[in-house]
Amino acid sequence: MKSIILIAPPAAGKGTEAAILKERYNIPHISTGDLLRKASTENTEEGLEIKEELEHGALVEDDIVVKLLRERILEDDCKDGYILDGFPRTVMQARIYENMLKSIGKDLGVVIYLNIDKETARNRIIGRISCPKCGKVYNTLVEGLKPQMEGICDTCHVALYKRTDDTAATFDERFNTYVNKTSKLIDYYKAKGVLNTVDSSISKEHTDLQVERILKNDNN
Ligand code: AMP
Protein backbone atom coordinates (compact mmCIF):
# COMPACT_ATOMS: atom_id res chain seq x y z
CA MET A 1 0.00 0.00 0.00
CA LYS A 2 1.14 3.49 -0.83
CA SER A 3 0.75 6.50 1.42
CA ILE A 4 -2.56 8.31 1.10
CA ILE A 5 -3.01 12.06 1.46
CA LEU A 6 -6.55 13.10 2.39
CA ILE A 7 -7.40 16.74 1.69
CA ALA A 8 -10.72 18.11 2.86
CA PRO A 9 -12.42 21.02 4.62
CA PRO A 10 -13.38 20.52 8.29
CA ALA A 11 -16.07 17.83 8.81
CA ALA A 12 -15.81 16.33 5.31
CA GLY A 13 -15.18 12.93 6.88
CA LYS A 14 -11.39 12.76 6.70
CA GLY A 15 -11.06 11.24 10.16
CA THR A 16 -13.81 8.68 9.54
CA GLU A 17 -12.39 7.58 6.18
CA ALA A 18 -8.86 7.48 7.60
CA ALA A 19 -10.03 5.15 10.39
CA ILE A 20 -11.60 2.81 7.79
CA LEU A 21 -8.43 2.78 5.65
CA LYS A 22 -6.20 2.25 8.69
CA GLU A 23 -8.10 -0.91 9.55
CA ARG A 24 -8.37 -2.17 5.99
CA TYR A 25 -4.72 -1.70 5.01
CA ASN A 26 -3.12 -1.91 8.43
CA ILE A 27 -1.21 1.34 8.02
CA PRO A 28 -1.15 4.17 10.59
CA HIS A 29 -3.41 7.19 10.47
CA ILE A 30 -1.39 10.35 11.02
CA SER A 31 -3.45 13.41 11.84
CA THR A 32 -1.38 16.57 12.23
CA GLY A 33 -4.31 17.96 14.27
CA ASP A 34 -3.88 15.06 16.72
CA LEU A 35 -0.07 15.49 16.79
CA LEU A 36 -0.59 19.19 17.56
CA ARG A 37 -3.30 18.61 20.18
CA LYS A 38 -0.92 16.23 21.95
CA ALA A 39 2.00 18.69 21.70
CA SER A 40 -0.27 21.49 23.02
CA THR A 41 -0.64 19.70 26.35
CA GLU A 42 3.09 20.04 27.05
CA ASN A 43 3.86 22.82 29.44
CA THR A 44 6.54 24.47 27.26
CA GLU A 45 6.64 27.72 25.28
CA GLU A 46 5.98 25.73 22.09
CA GLY A 47 3.11 23.82 23.72
CA LEU A 48 1.45 27.05 24.81
CA GLU A 49 1.93 28.64 21.39
CA ILE A 50 0.30 25.63 19.72
CA LYS A 51 -2.58 25.67 22.22
CA GLU A 52 -3.36 29.28 21.40
CA GLU A 53 -3.35 28.68 17.61
CA LEU A 54 -5.62 25.64 18.01
CA GLU A 55 -8.11 27.61 20.07
CA HIS A 56 -8.33 30.23 17.32
CA GLY A 57 -8.59 27.71 14.50
CA ALA A 58 -5.50 29.28 12.91
CA LEU A 59 -2.76 27.32 11.19
CA VAL A 60 0.22 26.44 13.37
CA GLU A 61 3.65 27.47 12.05
CA ASP A 62 5.09 25.23 9.33
CA ASP A 63 8.34 24.59 11.24
CA ILE A 64 6.47 23.11 14.20
CA VAL A 65 4.06 20.97 12.14
CA VAL A 66 6.79 19.68 9.82
CA LYS A 67 9.06 18.75 12.74
CA LEU A 68 6.28 16.73 14.42
CA LEU A 69 5.32 15.07 11.13
CA ARG A 70 8.86 14.15 10.13
CA GLU A 71 9.44 12.48 13.50
CA ARG A 72 6.20 10.54 13.11
CA ILE A 73 6.71 9.23 9.57
CA LEU A 74 10.21 8.06 10.41
CA GLU A 75 8.74 5.66 12.96
CA ASP A 76 8.85 2.00 11.99
CA ASP A 77 5.10 1.49 11.57
CA CYS A 78 5.10 3.98 8.65
CA LYS A 79 7.52 2.03 6.47
CA ASP A 80 4.76 0.46 4.30
CA GLY A 81 2.73 3.66 4.03
CA TYR A 82 0.39 5.80 6.15
CA ILE A 83 -2.71 7.92 5.86
CA LEU A 84 -2.04 11.61 6.14
CA ASP A 85 -4.94 13.64 7.47
CA GLY A 86 -4.69 17.40 7.77
CA PHE A 87 -1.34 17.83 6.04
CA PRO A 88 -0.38 19.47 3.75
CA ARG A 89 -2.81 22.33 4.25
CA THR A 90 -1.05 24.92 2.10
CA VAL A 91 0.94 24.90 -1.13
CA MET A 92 4.01 25.85 0.90
CA GLN A 93 3.54 22.76 3.12
CA ALA A 94 3.08 20.59 0.00
CA ARG A 95 6.44 21.81 -1.34
CA ILE A 96 8.20 21.33 2.00
CA TYR A 97 6.65 17.85 2.22
CA GLU A 98 7.89 16.83 -1.25
CA ASN A 99 11.43 17.86 -0.31
CA MET A 100 11.16 15.97 2.96
CA LEU A 101 9.96 12.82 1.15
CA LYS A 102 12.83 13.09 -1.31
CA SER A 103 15.33 13.38 1.55
CA ILE A 104 14.00 10.23 3.24
CA GLY A 105 13.41 8.26 0.01
CA LYS A 106 9.61 8.03 0.10
CA ASP A 107 6.97 8.60 -2.65
CA LEU A 108 4.16 11.14 -2.58
CA GLY A 109 1.51 8.38 -2.81
CA VAL A 110 -2.15 8.94 -3.68
CA VAL A 111 -3.81 12.33 -3.20
CA ILE A 112 -7.56 12.25 -2.48
CA TYR A 113 -9.75 15.32 -2.09
CA LEU A 114 -13.00 14.91 -0.12
CA ASN A 115 -15.33 17.58 -1.39
CA ILE A 116 -18.23 18.97 0.72
CA ASP A 117 -20.27 22.20 0.80
CA LYS A 118 -20.06 24.55 3.80
CA GLU A 119 -23.62 24.06 5.12
CA THR A 120 -23.40 20.26 5.20
CA ALA A 121 -20.00 20.53 6.89
CA ARG A 122 -21.31 22.97 9.52
CA ASN A 123 -24.20 20.67 10.46
CA ARG A 124 -21.85 17.74 10.80
CA ILE A 125 -19.40 19.55 13.06
CA ILE A 126 -21.97 20.56 15.67
CA GLY A 127 -22.64 16.89 16.62
CA ARG A 128 -19.11 15.51 16.26
CA ILE A 129 -17.59 13.51 19.15
CA SER A 130 -14.49 11.26 19.17
CA CYS A 131 -12.91 8.46 21.14
CA PRO A 132 -9.85 9.64 23.12
CA LYS A 133 -8.36 6.13 22.86
CA CYS A 134 -8.74 4.90 19.25
CA GLY A 135 -9.58 8.26 17.61
CA LYS A 136 -12.79 6.98 16.01
CA VAL A 137 -15.17 9.80 15.08
CA TYR A 138 -18.92 9.66 15.79
CA ASN A 139 -21.72 12.14 15.18
CA THR A 140 -24.78 12.51 17.38
CA LEU A 141 -26.71 14.18 14.53
CA VAL A 142 -25.80 11.98 11.56
CA GLU A 143 -27.47 8.58 11.06
CA GLY A 144 -24.90 5.83 10.65
CA LEU A 145 -22.32 7.75 12.71
CA LYS A 146 -24.01 7.59 16.13
CA PRO A 147 -22.35 5.36 18.76
CA GLN A 148 -24.40 2.28 19.74
CA MET A 149 -24.55 3.53 23.34
CA GLU A 150 -24.89 7.29 23.84
CA GLY A 151 -21.52 8.95 24.61
CA ILE A 152 -19.54 5.66 24.63
CA CYS A 153 -17.05 4.29 22.05
CA ASP A 154 -18.36 1.08 20.40
CA THR A 155 -14.88 -0.44 20.37
CA CYS A 156 -13.04 0.86 23.46
CA HIS A 157 -16.11 1.39 25.74
CA VAL A 158 -14.66 4.67 27.06
CA ALA A 159 -16.45 8.05 27.22
CA LEU A 160 -16.42 10.03 23.96
CA TYR A 161 -15.29 13.67 24.04
CA LYS A 162 -16.12 16.82 22.11
CA ARG A 163 -13.20 18.80 20.68
CA THR A 164 -13.01 22.33 22.08
CA ASP A 165 -12.64 23.71 18.52
CA ASP A 166 -15.84 22.01 17.28
CA THR A 167 -18.06 25.06 17.82
CA ALA A 168 -20.06 27.08 15.29
CA ALA A 169 -17.76 30.13 15.71
CA THR A 170 -14.51 28.19 15.34
CA PHE A 171 -16.02 26.27 12.44
CA ASP A 172 -16.41 29.50 10.43
CA GLU A 173 -12.80 30.47 11.15
CA ARG A 174 -11.53 27.01 10.20
CA PHE A 175 -13.64 26.82 7.07
CA ASN A 176 -12.46 30.27 5.97
CA THR A 177 -8.84 29.31 6.63
CA TYR A 178 -9.45 26.25 4.48
CA VAL A 179 -10.98 28.22 1.62
CA ASN A 180 -8.21 30.83 1.72
CA LYS A 181 -5.25 28.51 1.99
CA THR A 182 -6.01 24.81 1.56
CA SER A 183 -8.21 25.09 -1.52
CA LYS A 184 -5.15 26.35 -3.45
CA LEU A 185 -3.63 22.94 -2.80
CA ILE A 186 -6.36 21.41 -4.93
CA ASP A 187 -5.25 23.49 -7.91
CA TYR A 188 -1.64 22.64 -7.11
CA TYR A 189 -2.22 18.85 -7.15
CA LYS A 190 -4.60 19.16 -10.11
CA ALA A 191 -1.86 20.88 -12.10
CA LYS A 192 0.50 18.03 -11.22
CA GLY A 193 -2.13 15.53 -12.47
CA VAL A 194 -2.28 13.64 -9.16
CA LEU A 195 -5.60 14.84 -7.73
CA ASN A 196 -8.50 12.41 -7.19
CA THR A 197 -11.80 14.01 -6.16
CA VAL A 198 -14.56 12.35 -4.10
CA ASP A 199 -18.00 13.72 -3.23
CA SER A 200 -18.14 13.31 0.55
CA SER A 201 -21.45 15.08 1.23
CA ILE A 202 -23.67 11.97 1.01
CA SER A 203 -22.60 9.28 3.49
CA LYS A 204 -19.48 7.62 4.85
CA GLU A 205 -20.32 4.48 2.81
CA HIS A 206 -20.55 6.49 -0.41
CA THR A 207 -17.27 8.26 0.36
CA ASP A 208 -15.52 4.97 1.12
CA LEU A 209 -16.74 3.32 -2.09
CA GLN A 210 -15.29 6.12 -4.18
CA VAL A 211 -12.00 6.10 -2.25
CA GLU A 212 -11.69 2.33 -2.69
CA ARG A 213 -12.25 2.66 -6.42
CA ILE A 214 -9.43 5.21 -6.63
CA LEU A 215 -7.02 3.07 -4.59
CA LYS A 216 -7.78 -0.05 -6.64
CA ASN A 217 -7.23 1.77 -9.94
CA ASP A 218 -4.03 3.28 -8.60
CA ASN A 219 -2.65 -0.12 -7.65
CA ASN A 220 -3.38 -1.63 -11.08
P1 AMP B 1 -7.73 19.12 12.31
O1 AMP B 1 -7.77 18.12 13.42
O2 AMP B 1 -7.06 18.59 11.08
O3 AMP B 1 -9.09 19.72 12.02
O4 AMP B 1 -6.79 20.32 12.82
C1 AMP B 1 -7.11 21.04 13.98
C2 AMP B 1 -6.23 22.28 14.06
O5 AMP B 1 -4.84 21.89 14.11
C3 AMP B 1 -6.33 23.22 12.86
O6 AMP B 1 -7.43 24.10 12.97
C4 AMP B 1 -4.98 23.94 12.95
O7 AMP B 1 -5.01 24.89 13.99
C5 AMP B 1 -4.03 22.82 13.40
N1 AMP B 1 -3.41 22.10 12.26
C6 AMP B 1 -3.65 20.81 11.88
N2 AMP B 1 -2.90 20.46 10.81
C7 AMP B 1 -2.17 21.56 10.49
C8 AMP B 1 -1.22 21.85 9.46
N3 AMP B 1 -0.92 20.96 8.51
N4 AMP B 1 -0.65 23.09 9.46
C9 AMP B 1 -0.97 24.00 10.40
N5 AMP B 1 -1.86 23.80 11.38
C10 AMP B 1 -2.47 22.60 11.44
Image (tube, rainbow, N blue to C red):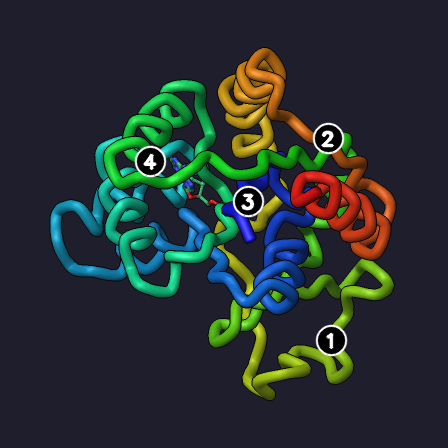
Asked if the residue at tag 2 contacts the one at tag 4, i.e. Cβ–Cβ closer than 8 Å, the answer is: no
Mark 4 and mark 2: Cα distance apart in space: 23 Å
Q: Residue at x 66, y 62 (%)?
A: 20
Which residue position is annotated with label 4? 101
Q: Nearer the viewer, residue 206 or 37?
A: 206
Ligand 1 neighbours mark 3 (CB distance < 8 Å)? no
Location of residue 55 in the rendering, given as x and y in whole percent from the top left corner: 40, 44
- Element on which disc 2 rests: strand
> With 58 as the anchor, is 217 left or right in this view?
right
Residue identified by numbered label 1: 147
Mark 4 vs mark 2: in front: 4
Identify the residue under disc 3: 4
Q: Are marks 2 and 3 in contact (CB under 8 Å)?
A: no
Q: Residue at x 24, y 39 (%)?
A: 64
**Does 117 appear above or below 219?**
above
Ligand 1 shows up in the quarter that is top left
Which one is earlier in the sequence, the residue at label 4 or at label 2? 4
The alpha-carbon separation of the residues under discs 3 and 1 comes to 27 Å
Tag nearer the camera, 1 or 2: 2
What is the three-letter code of the residue carrying label 2? Thr
Q: Is residue 125 left or right of residue 26?
A: right
In the image, farthest residue toward the front: 220
Amino acid residing under circle 1: Pro
Q: Which residue in the protein does label 2 denote?
A: 197
